[in-house]
């Protein structure tokens, strides 16, 4: 039996004679370790990696008993929109098995901690889902963090995105604990390892103001950006600062889509910026808005390395 699939409450464990512990399937016997028991206990409580922990719990139930953790490589909402599907397999392997390798759980009820690895892509209308997931975390070591259409507390967002190199946020409401919206530059500032950033504003136009781009250019972590995509950008974004941003991050692939209802004056300023990009022959720069010159749009897209 693979102990990684178990979820055990400490209160449910009853000591028996000869220091045996009753499990649901079979008893766990006291082990005669070659190392001091204090060292074994430390190993159980402080696994160096997810791979190491999986080997420990496969070798002996003691390690899961002392520190019950579920190693999760993929996580998603089940079709009932209530339960959570977790899996320890790679995404493609899980997809090929049509999710038959997944386990359905109720996040709110499990007693085990969760160790997230690889990718996390969540679309959920469950209230406070991310907060609930954060409360169950042992560690979060994901490379990709994607969320869509959710209400997220900023502290929870930082908790989940701290190690991610690729971030996708589509039409989410990210707020401080007092309900105040978090600005785009504040979101980027907390992403210490970010290399790919894809952000869709939706109705959250208050995330950008006249100083947003100037603040972003001060962030050291943005120097690692490989791709930077913003969609439905409001007119409040300062285009002079945006021009400086495009010049500063020459090696970053940048794709910018503006809101449908920007003013004609703002469109004229965008056209000047677009002409600059085309005249200088700068690749990997795309700026689009409703009603722009089609040929110029095609030229920029033809120069973008997909």
Image (tube, rainbow, N blue to C red):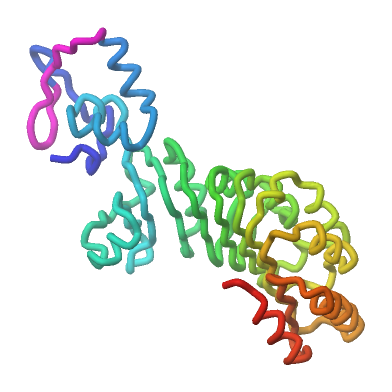
Identified at 12% across, 27% down, the residue is 22
Identified at 14% across, 12% down, the residue is 32
- The spot of residue 144 in percent (x, y) is 50, 54
Identified at 69% across, 46% down, the residue is 221
- The spot of residue 148 in percent (x, y) is 54, 65
- The spot of residue 45 in percent (x, y) is 36, 23
In this rendering, the count of numbered labels is: 0
Q: Main secondary structure of the magenta part?
A: loop
Q: Image quarter for residue 159?
A: top right
* Vertical placement of residue 30 versus 243, above or below: above
Q: Quadrant of the C terminus?
A: bottom right
- Can see residue 178? no
Q: What residue occupies the far top of the structure in this picture?
A: 36
- Can see residue 196? yes
Q: Image quarter for residue 55?
A: top left
Identified at 22% across, 57% down, the residue is 101
- Is 35 a magenta residue? yes
Q: Nearer the viewer, residue 199 or 203?
A: 199
- Is 262 a magenta residue? no
Q: Nearer the viewer, residue 2 or 241?
A: 241
* Vertical placement of residue 146 versus 66, above or below: below
Q: Which residues are magenta?
A: 21-36
Q: Quadrant of the N terminus?
A: top left
User: Left or right of 97: which side holds 30?
Assistant: left
- The spot of residue 297 in percent (x, y) is 72, 85
User: Left or right of 229: which side holds 115?
Assistant: left
* Vertical placement of residue 81 versus 41, above or below: below
């Amino acid at each position: 039996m693979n102990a990684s699939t178990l979820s055990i409450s400490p209160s449910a464990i009853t000591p028996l004679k000869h220091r045996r512990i009753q499990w649901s399937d079979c008893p766990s016997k006291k082990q005669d370790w070659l190392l001091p028991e204090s060292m074994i206990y430390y190993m159980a409580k402080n696994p160096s990696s997810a791979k190491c922990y999986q080997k420990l719990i496969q070798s002996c139930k003691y390690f899961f008993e002392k520190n019950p953790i579920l190693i999760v490589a993929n996580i998603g909402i089940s079709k009932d929109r209530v339960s959570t599907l977790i899996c320890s397999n790679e995404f493609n392997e899980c997809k090929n098995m049509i999710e038959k390798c997944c386990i359905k759980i109720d996040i709110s009820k499990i007693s085990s901690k969760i160790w997230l690895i690889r990718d996390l892509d969540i679309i959920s209308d469950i209230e406070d889902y991310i907060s609930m997931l954060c409360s169950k975390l042992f560690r979060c070591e994901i490379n990709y963090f994607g969320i869509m259409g959710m209400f997220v507390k900023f502290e929870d967002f930082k908790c989940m995105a701290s190690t991610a190199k690729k971030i996708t946020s589509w039409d989410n409401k990210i707020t401080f604990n007092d309900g105040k919206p978090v600005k785009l530059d504040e979101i980027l500032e907390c992403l210490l390892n970010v290399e790919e950033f894809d952000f869709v504003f939706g109705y959250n136009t208050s995330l950008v103001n006249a100083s947003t781009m100037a603040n972003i250019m001060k962030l050291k972590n943005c120097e690692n950006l490989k791709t930077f995509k913003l969609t439905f950008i409001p007119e409040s974004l300062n285009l002079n600062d945006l021009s400086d941003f495009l010049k500063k991050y020459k090696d970053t692939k940048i794709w910018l889509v503006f809101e449908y209802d920007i003013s004609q004056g703002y469109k004229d300023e965008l056209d000047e910026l677009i002409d600059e990009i085309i005249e200088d022959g700068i690749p990997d720069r795309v700026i689009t808005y409703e009603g722009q010159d089609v040929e110029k749009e095609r030229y920029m897209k033809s120069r973008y390395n997909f």
